[in-house]
Each structure stands twice: as C-alpha cells, then as structure tokens.
Amino acid sequence: MVVRENPGFWRLFFVVQGSIIPKTFPKVAAILALAILAVVLHRYYPELFSISSVTAFTLLGISLSLFLGFRNHASYERWWEGRKLWGSLMFSSRNLNRQMNTFFCTEDEVSHACRERIAHLNIAFIHAVNHRLRQQHNEFESARYLSPDDNDLLEKRTNKAVGILQIMGQELGRWHQQGLIDSTSLRDINRCLNQLSEDYCACERILTTPIPFAYMLLLHRTAYAYCVLLPWGIVASIGSATPILAALVAYTFFGFDALSEELASPFSRENNSLAIDTMTRQLEIETLQAIDSPLEAPAPIPGEKYILN
C-alpha cells in the first residue's frame, strides 16, 4: 500500500515512487516512438494520411474511457471490500482478546493459561489467513504459537486457518465441560469466532473470484489498438503535437489499466495492494501485550520508500 503525503503541485509531476509509471513507461515510450514515426512519415509522405478528422477517435476514446471507468470501479470495490474485511478481522480479534481477559480475569494459573492459549491461537489464525491470501508456500511462520499437537494436526490440513478455528472451538468446548466457562460467556466468545470465520471466507471469495477474463481481455485489446492507431489518425490534424497527445492518452489508458489490475488483487504484493503484513504484525503485537506475554513482541513493520507491505 502506498502511504505518502501530498507531494504538492510541482512535485506531483515528478513523483515516480509509488506511482504507476514504472509499469506503464515501456508501453508509453513505444507509443511515443510510434507517434514520432508518424510525424516523420507525414512530413515526407503527406498523401499517405488522408484522415483529416479525429471524430472517430474521439467517439472511440469516450467509449473506451467509460469501459475503463467501469472496470476501475469494479476493481476498487474489490480493494475496498478487502480492506473492510480486514478491519472486521482486526475488530473481532481485539474483541476476542478483551472477552478472554474479562471472562478469565483472575490471576490464577488456569485462567492465565486459558488466556494465553486463545491469544496464541488467535495470532496463529491471523498469520494463517495472511499466509493463505498471499498464497505463500514457505514454512508456516506462526508455528511457535502452536503446540506440537496443533502443528501435527495442521500439517494434514490444506487450509490451516480453518483448522486453527476448529482447535479454538474445541478448546472452548472442553473448558465449558470442565466448568471453567459458563454458557453465556461461551456464546459471546463463539460469536467472535463465527465473525472471524465469516470474514475469512469473504476474503477467500475475493481471492478465488477474479474479474472475468473475457471482460479484461476486451479492454486490453481495445486500449492497445486505440493507442497504436491514434498517432496515424490525428497526425494530419495536429502535426508535430501528435507525440505529446499520443503519449498523454497512452499514459492515461495504460495507467488506468495497470492500476485496476493491482486493485483487483487486494491481497497481492503489488504497491497498491493492502498492507496485510503490517496489519498482521500489529495484531500480533497487540495480542501479546493484552496478555502480558513473556514472549518478546516483534517490532512493527516499517514502511520502505512510502510502501507498506
């Protein structure tokens, strides 16, 4: 996620870090070179350019702008829904910590062990959600918060987040049977677990349901065709200004296209994706502090060149 202050009017035109320019520059440069070639050929072979009106390109450009606008809106909706879901995950996790501290408020060894157990499983769950949404296939990094039996059980599960929620439910059920927690408290805590499960499933829905490929392909083809043909269609009308206009239009269309691709995948590691690593670390720190854990809390993840992962 790009996090930076407003660069101001003049610096706005020269900001590269955090912008979409690195992705669009090769394409815009190619259109600029094509436009310069069109200007040169028009100067020496004007008879090849019989188009003197830009009406057709204007109408096509307006239509293409509308389609790109619809796609950007759909992509932003996915990005914003993902952010709301992660906000709900953080809310439910904090509620779970608070409820455990409330219902197991005594300082005896059993109460402390129960608070610590659920807190560690909560941290492991958030890490597992992050791990799943970013499709990481490296070693499961929250194993230190789980018991050997937990790790053995999760080793057989393809969806570790669901497995951790199941372990949490089993622990709460066992404590209820032992009389450590009453039915009302169990119901309230279980609501938090249900909300965590619901938010996680909604995140998986975004992850596994991309924008229809045929829709994206149509926009890609139309945008590329329009930007390639534009210099040849307007050079007879505006002459030497063709490269500037063609490059500006190409930057706009290619920029919106690249930005919408990033926003459509809110859990990826692109610059404009959600900073779920940072939010996961924040929840880990808060949860360990909530139970006064003897484990050392990790340091917050700092931003790097205006980018939060």
Image (spheres, rainbow, N blue to C red):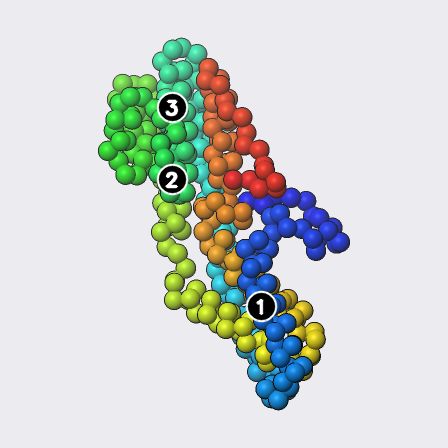
The quadrant the N terminus occupies is top right
Question: Mark 2 packing: few (<14 Cα in 10 Å), some, or many (20+)?
Answer: few
SS at mark 2 in the image: loop
Residue 31: numbered disc: 1
The kind of residue tagged 2 is Gln
SS at mark 1 in the image: helix
Q: Residue at x 46, y 15 (%)?
A: 294
Which one is closest to the eye, mark 3 or mark 1? 1
SS at mark 3 in the image: helix
- Residue under label 2, please give it: 136
Q: Is residue 77 visible?
A: no
The kind of residue tagged 3 is Tyr
Question: Mark 1 packing: few (<14 Cα in 10 Å), some, or many (20+)?
Answer: many
Q: Residue at x 47, y 22 (%)?
A: 288
Is 36 placed above or below 80 here? below
Q: Give whichever of discs 3 and 1 has the lower sequence position.
A: 1
- Residue under label 3, please give it: 145
